Amino acid sequence: MVSAQAQAQTDAACELHVWPASTPMNLYLGLGHGGIIDGSTKGREGYPPAPDNPLSAERQAQLLSEAGLPDLLKLPGYRVMLHPQPLDSRTIRTTRGRIADSAAPCYAELIVDDLILNQNSVGGGNGLRGSFRFRTFGTAPEPIRTFGTWTLVKLAAFPPKPDEDPAKGTAEVVQAFRTSLVDFAAAVTRPPRTKR
């Protein structure tokens, strides 16, 4: 049985609210064409079929829950509140206060805004691009700090060639997502530059 004091401490815990992105978009760049997001699904000529996507919102949510985000983001004492449904663009860009309906005494948000699987048949620059947003509120109703940036993790085995086992490419994209989280957290927690 949980004591009243322990329950009060749990109820008062700091919260990190986390949202995955929608299914990643595809960006193909080739000779004489390319550069349209999801060109193949829009019926544009010259675009190869989009590869099977290993990063559904559900898979991202699982990876986010396993990532140890409070440690990565240097938020000791925060518990992760995972929201499995991606946020729409308008909510992300126009909400000034807390997105989640939370009365936690200290509160932060991590949003996976966009994921793009880049395929570059000219320069060989395949990679996973991720756009992440982080806001921390402390006890305030509006954020005291907002930070967002893109990450890029290169891919060698994705998309798989027709004669290759797709499992290798899938595993590489999943690992690239994990690496993106680590890279973003490193950017968020990097000490500010001192002026000379």
Image: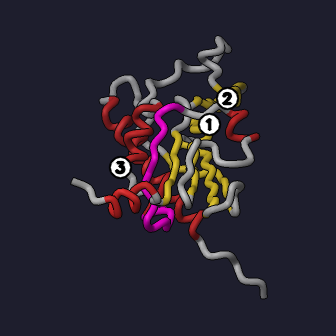
Residue at the (39%, 44%) spot, across then down? 63
Q: Is residue 13 left or right of residue 115?
A: left
Mark 2 in CB contact with mark 1 (< 8 angstroms): yes
Q: Which residue is mark 1?
A: 122
Residue 20 in percent (x, y) is at 51, 39
Q: Which residues are magenta?
A: 71-85
- The amino acid type, in three-letter code, at marker 1 is Val
Q: Quadrant of the C terminus?
A: bottom right
Pick the residue in front: 125 or 178. Answer: 178
Check disc 2: other Cα within 10 Å, few if <14, some if 14-19, many if 20+. few
Q: CA distance from mark 1 to mark 3?
A: 36 Å
Q: Is residue 148 above or below residue 167?
A: below
Marks 3 & 2, CB-CB < 8 Å contact? no
What kind of element bears circle 3? helix
Q: Residue under circle 2?
A: 31
Task: Give the residue at the far front of this rendering.
Answer: 4
Q: Is residue 115 left or right of residue 173?
A: right
Q: Amino acid at mark 2?
A: Leu
In the image, residue 3 lies at what x, y percent? 28, 59
- Which is more toward the observer, 146 or 26? 146
Bin the neighbour count of mark 3 within 10 Å (Cα to Cα): few under 14, some 14-19, many 20 and up. Answer: few
